[in-house]
Amino acid sequence: VFLQTILVGDSGVGKTSLLVQFDQGKFIPGSFSATVGIGFTRHRHVFQGSIWDTAGQERFRSVTHAYYRDAHALLLLYDITSKTSFDNIRAWLTEIHEYAQSDVVIMLLGNKADMSSVRAIRRDEGERLAREYSVPFMETSAKTGVNVELAFTAVSKELKHRAVQHPNEPKFQIHEYIETQKEKSGCCSSF
Ligand SMILES: Nc1nc2c(ncn2[C@@H]2O[C@H](COP(=O)(O)OP(=O)(O)OP(=O)(O)O)[C@@H](O)[C@H]2O)c(=O)[nH]1
């Protein structure tokens, strides 16, 4: 099975940066250039699949919709310093439910966790929204790399497990896996 993961969310939340951090282990500050359509060049083979970076801008929406259907997993990002990007998550989820496969693995990510001094969305607000939609959640930073590897690994493990599920094997618990692995970024700043 060829597994496809795509990154979605508002323009500027850090989708390209997250993928660059995961792929190359680096962050290029102030290098905001909006993705046009689909980031074809920015996919990396993980396990037996690939990751696609989509454009957050509204005008590319019809292009990205076409990719939802073939996606096995979706990483849905908002920016913890942007209330708008968080408020738009519900709209993104509506789109996902409309265009993606019903069994798609979804993970909610609150990115830019390194900017907690100017955060607009508390971590528990992210957690609550994720619970409402029964999706796993974590805060990430494409800048420091916190939880970046984990986000991709957790999704890959879940997909891999589904693909090769043996009858007597216990089901992979993505929520538990994340809880035991996650770095509590900005743990000590005020909620
Ligand atoms: N401090 C900080 N800045 C970040 C982080 N992630 C992204 N940025 C910055 O936010 C801006 C937007 O990042 P991109 O990765 O281009 O955003 P995008 O979601 O791919 O945007 P579109 O391609 O338009 O959909 C850039 O200036 C990044 O350097 C992060 O985790 N921390």
Image (cartoon, rainbow, N blue to C red):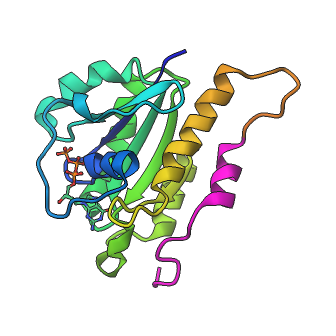
Residue at horizontal 25%, vertical 26%? Answer: 64
Name the spot of residue 131 as percent of width and height, x first.
Answer: 57, 52
Q: Which one is in front, 32 or 110? A: 32
Q: Quadrant of ligand 1?
A: bottom left
In the image, 95: left or right of 11? right
**Residue lying at 47% horizontally and 68% vertically, measured from the top left:** 123
Task: Find out whether residue 123 is within the magenta segment.
Answer: no
Asked whether 188 falls inside the magenta stretch, the response is yes
| In the image, residue 27 above or below residue 101 | below
Which residue appears farthest toward the front when viewing the image? 24
> Is 20 situated left or right of 56 in this image?
right
Eyeballing the image, is 44 above or below 108?
Answer: above
Q: Is residue 34 left or right of residue 89?
A: left
Question: What residue appears at the point 49 percent right and 59 percent down from the top-left corner?
Answer: 147
Q: Position of residue 1 (x, y in %)?
A: 55, 15
- Magenta-highlighted residues: 173-191
Q: Indicate whether 188 appears above or below 85.
A: below
Instruction: Out of 47 and 110, give the one closest to the viewer.
Output: 47
